[in-house]
Image: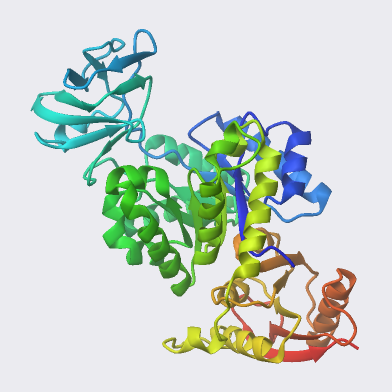
Amino acid sequence: MIRGTKIVATLGPATSDPEVLERLIRAGVDVVRLNFSHGKAQDHIDRANMVREIAQKVGRTVALMADLQGPKIRVGKFVDGKVQLVKGERFVLDASRTEPGDIDGVGLDYKELPRDVKPGDTLLLNDGLIVLTVEEVKGDKVHTIVKVEGELSNNKGINKQGGGLTAPALTAKDMDDIRTAASFRCDYLAVSFPKNATDMEMARQLANVAGESQRHKPAMIAKIERTEAIPNLESILKASDGIMVARGDLAVEVGNASVPALQKRMIRMAREMDKVVITATQMMESMILAPVPTRAEVSDVANAVLDGTDAVMLSAETAAGRYPIETVETMAAIALEAERAEEVQPIEAGFLNKKFGRIDQSIAAGALFTAQHLGCKAIVALTESGSTALWISRQRTSVPIFALTSQPNSLRRMALYRNVTPLMMQSFEDRDTALAEAERLLTAQGVLRPGDTYAITCGEPMGYPGGTNMLKICRVA
């Protein structure tokens, strides 16, 4: 059984060695995330090149995702690197402070905070481990009272409960990073803290301009981590190629209890709108230090798979953890086991309320319906852009999908699509020659055997994106 759910792994100090990275990719990583919150531009370029070289060496298709830092909504630094805040004590967040902080207060990277808050607001620091209540705002100083005490160290993040911070999604650093990501032709660009569709449209425009000289346009992923993004989910999805359920900052803003239902809703909406979805944050957190996950983490990963997520993501677990290889292997095993237990509904149930305005979408639906009812061994999509494979993968099916393309960009982009195995195949102008080569390739891969039935889609004339207009049912001789 081929694992359908994809794995996104973050590179960092623990996985930057070529030998370790090779083991990581062999263990099952489908997408490598480059976190632009850390490192210099050249670091990311070097790592991107290394990923591509190793992926080619081991014969696996691996996509690259550049994850933008977004606005730095953080406290400044402290004289001793940290302070211990005590419940009931006062603490000042000072946008004008330039000297290191102490037990009485600290400076801010985010200078707009005094204009974004008012008395009575709740501020959550260090992923919600420290809670402050705003007492008053005087000029550049936000006077607070500590409600939940704890250790506060340099550059920890700040969230406002219920949202409402006006920080723009794209900073000057992000704009520079977009150019860096374009230089190595990133397959996916993840945008942090978008509030609405406009943020995503602006990011896409900047990315397209940056990649214009190489005629490269990355797919756009919106990281849903702000309260304001929730009512705008539909418009954000329309403006994006996919979303990331970024449960860390989102949980701090909306409350932990609200996240599971939001996760299910976001995954469902993304699939219904023919977009991809990644579930992220603390999925295997304990494996940063331990060789095995907790039972709760196993259930968390399995439930995301059963919800229908395209991919599950690892952050610090592979970037800085002690057991990056074991973490990927464990996650892959959990995903595969969850997929075995998945109940696939009759395929026509997913089409009851769908209307198709395009021929290629109708062909994708027909391939799904026919393959499921005939018990086909595979659905094969000959695709230039990858769109047909994406549409087929939006419906739950027990039939594996193989996407054959001559376009390297499309090949890597499809590495994120659930239940899709992308394969490179040379382009043919003649339809019958292309179909014969597809069967030969899949037979050589061991996917198809004599007597097997499979459904195959393609377009005539061959070689045009969006031109899928044919479905054929074949039996291997």
Display colour scheme: rainbow
Image location (x, y in percent) of residue 100: 31, 11
Q: Quadrant of residue 4?
A: bottom right
Residue at x-position 62% and y-position 69% = 341
Residue at x-position 62% and y-position 82% = 467
If the image is split into quadrants, where does the N terminus sit? bottom right
If the image is split into quadrants, where does the C terminus sit? bottom right
Q: Nearer the viewer, residue 57 or 337?
A: 337
Q: Nearer the viewer, residue 253 or 381?
A: 253
Residue 30 seen in the figure: no
Residue at x-position 59% and y-position 73% = 393
Q: Quadrant of residue 82?
A: top left
Count of residue discs: 0
Image location (x, y in percent) of residue 437: 85, 78
Image location (x, y in percent) of residue 304: 51, 59
Query: Is 206 placed left or right of 465 in the picture?
Result: left
Residue 149 seen in the figure: yes
Image location (x, y in percent) of residue 251: 35, 46
Q: Quadrant of residue 155?
A: top left
Q: Nearer the viewer, residue 408 or 334?
A: 334
Residue at x-position 42% and y-position 51% = 203
Query: Is 451 placed left or right of 473 in the picture?
Result: right
Q: Nearer the viewer, residue 208 or 437?
A: 437
Is 271 rendered above or below residue 320? below
